[in-house]
Amino acid sequence: MARLEVRRQLVAGLLLAAGGLAWLAGLAPGDGFWSSLFWPELLTGTGMGLSFVPIALGATAGAPPQHAGLASGLLITTCQMGGAIGLAATAAVAAAVHPGSAARVAVAPALTSGYDHALGACVGVLVARALAALFYPARPKRAPVLAGEGFRSSTEAGPSPIRCVPLTSTSGSARCQLDRWGVSTVSPERAL
């Protein structure tokens, strides 16, 4: 039941944020602060706030405890890169609407028209994310356990086996790969 509530919160948050951005996309030069900026920004901020926790829960749900930091770091890096790429894409959309119009016509209508189109594109992305959240599986799939190929170190917790492949290097170590979460190094005696 809790997973369903988290999914509902995510979808509701994304749709609230999309509604706030759609409201902002209707801006015109000279609109008032309270009716045209404050309430849509409050709606967008509330929606994004509601969606952050479910996104973090979904991104780190299948991670074993020893790899929670790795999953969290990957989530934060993805959010930072996504924000930068999203900002660049929306700025490109805003600039492409009227590429040279600032020199020929009034600046405020040209900028407003460009931002309206960019915010409309953001609304489309948020609605697509909400639809994807509806159809995403509720439980993360676990990697299959391979019989007879497992090795378990004394520090590892959890059900994931490690497969070790000796390296041909001067370090004398073996490369051990966790099924889902990366690479760790152990001595060749423990790998055999």
Image (tube, rainbow, N blue to C red):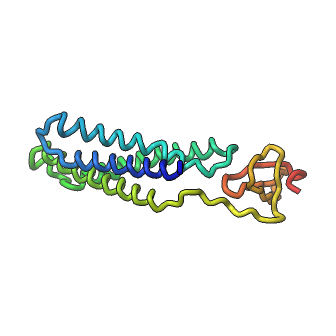
For the point 40% across and 56% down, which residue is it?
129
At which x and y percent is residue 135? 46, 62
Q: In which quarter of the image is the C terminus?
A: bottom right
Residue 9, placed above or below residue 136: above
At which x and y percent is residue 94? 25, 51
For the point 70% across and 58% down, which residue is it?
179
Looking at the image, which residue sits at the far left?
105
For the point 43% across and 47% down, which residue is it?
9
Looking at the image, which residue sits at the far bottom?
147
Counting labels gives 0
Answer left or right for 126 relative to 107. Answer: right
Looking at the image, which residue sits at the far front?
1
Query: Which sits in the foreground, 156 or 117?
Result: 156
Residue 109, placed above or below residue 169: above
At which x and y percent is residue 92? 30, 52
Answer left or right for 22 relative to 159. Answer: left
